[in-house]
Image: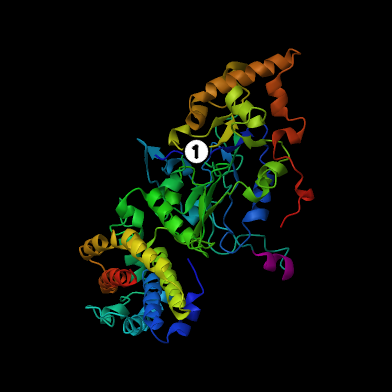
Amino acid sequence: MSVTTAKRQLAMVMDLNKCLGCHTCTIACKRLWTREEGMEYMWWNTVNTQPGGGTPRNWEEMGGGYRDGKVRPGKLPSRKDFGEAWEFNYDEVFYKGKGDSVHLKVVGEEPDWGPNWDEDQGAGVYPNSYYFYLPRICNHCTHPACLESCPRKAIIKREDDGVVLIDEERCRGYRFCMEACPYKKIYFNESTKVAQKCIFCFPRIEKGVAPACARQCPGRVRFVGYLDDPAGPIHKLVKTWKVAIPLHPEFGTEPNVFYVPPIAPPQFDAEGNIDETNPRIPTEYLHSLFGPAVDGALETLKAEMAKTRGGAKSELMDLLIAYKWTDMFKPFDKDPAKIIWT
Amino acid sequence: MTTAAAAEISDLRQGFESQTARRSELYRLLATAFGFPSADLRKAVSAGEVRAALAETAGGLPYSLAIPFDAPALADAGTGEDTLETEYIRLFDVGAGSGPPCPLYVGNWRGDRLGVMEECLRFYDHFGLGLPEPRPELPDHLTVALEFLHYLTFRQAEALRASAPCGDYVRAQRDFLDRAVLSWFPRMTSKLSGESPPPYYVTLASLALAFFEAEKAYLADLAKTAA
């Protein structure tokens, strides 16, 4: 395993207790970066319902990442696994006088999966059914398996901020990166024959503006900053409070997107009484996503919540509530409307 | 590495400098021939354009080469549309399992890859060159090294035409040819022959090796004369 050469690391924290599954982040990203030919099916940012198959379908079982310090190739996700960019019969419904008899549907092969196919399904049995939303982007890992697996050395980790980028001029579309990435956040462009993925909005970052997915989020879910900046929100949530933890740390890539895990309401017992001892989201399930660190994170969150309920002040709760959005992105809190983009 | 040399090389075809211009052109042609077999390159091979260009250029060198540059294999792009591409990926770019058997990166053969790349970059930088943007190859790739030798010989030819000193270019060629090409290319050629390569690459590697070795001897003579 190679050691990162990045001097500093940009990171993102997503508070899963605040994500309402509106997909504004996804659309912000789509409109900005993936509108070219060959990118129709790409969603560099996705929001999936957990538990669920995710995007691409069953990505958590596709392998990749590291084992015994070596890159472990996994399954190459197909376009179908991600979900095709469907074409609809707009013409027929809207312009050919069949609006009363024909309903809007996908043209061609009937799809059986898509980027958000199992939205809001979740798991569990009423009244203890549950789900939560899991937004995902490229994790800009400290040990990127994609970078290590590329025979062309076409993937770089930027020294100044740790952002992982694919050099599309060097990429020859071999797709080893797609096999190696355990989070399956790399897509293949069939038109240009290169691999493409989230770029952490680096042109915005370079101008002091947070990534579009974070800046546009109406739920104030996403925090952005340098991992080593003690004055910034990331350091406080990840290092100081330890309430933001990586997804699937066992993959071994050391992701730099961190999650504040969801606090579930208690279950109802057989008599319909509230059972405070059993959270609706099974602890084992959260362990399977975030590892054992989730226990400490949830304990801290619950303790700080209790503190505020008792009338005391909690720095952590204030931080997570994010009264001022600019506090979430420092130093990337510039207004994109006031930037001269060249 | 790109220069405007190719467009202007015909200007140097007169007199003594023409032989140097031919050497320069041959480096450029070999850089192209060892590049990734794009559709355009594949067509040029099939149509015999690559072979013709190599043979025509080799004819004007200041020495004769034992290996003919008009071998039929140099026009053999294989039966399938992607034969050359598949073989290039297998032999030079990716391979199977633990990497390609015959990588075209100097650093893969010499070791200390980063050190080798830095050495190459320092050579390029000394002569005012940088890598182009976008940069499809890393600085220690054979094609980049050959483009640099193309540049050095071109500048030598220009200096000859202007009756200006060209010792710097000759010394740099000798040094760089030794370090960045002859330090590994013979081993690569030998290994290549055991990897069932397509005839195009066998022949190309053999004649390139013959050319590099002839260059080494020629440059040694030039240096002696200059001394």
Tell me residue A6's x, y (percent). 52, 40
User: Which contiguous range is marked in magenta?
Assistant: A89-97
Q: Name the quarter where the C terminus of chain A is drawn.
A: bottom right
- Residue A92: say if magenta: yes
Q: Is residue A160 above or below residue B13?
A: above
Residue name at image x 77 percent, y 32 percent: A324
Task: For residue A127, say whether it is visible.
Answer: no
Tell me residue A190's x, y (percent). 50, 63
Per the image, label 1 sits on a secondary structure element best described as loop
- Badge 1: how crowded within 10 Å, few (<14), some, or many (20+)? many
In the rendered image, which residue does mark 1 sit on? A142
Task: For residue A102, say whether it is visible.
Answer: yes
Residue name at image x 72 percent, y 28 percent: A321
Tell me residue A114's x, y (percent). 56, 51
Tell me residue A59's x, y (percent). 47, 44
Q: How is the image coloured?
A: rainbow
- Residue B42: say if magenta: no
**Residue that extends furthest to the left in the rendered view of this protein:** B194
B222 or A318, which is in the foreground? B222
Q: Quadrant of residue A211?
A: top right
**Residue type at numbered disc 1:** Thr
A286 or A148, which is in the foreground? A148
**Residue that extends furthest to the right in the rendered view of this protein:** A338
Q: Quadrant of residue B55?
A: bottom left
A135 or A9, which is in the foreground? A9
Q: How many marks?
A: 1
In the image, taking residue A190 as reference, residue B94 lies left or right, namely left
Read off the chain for label 1.
Answer: A
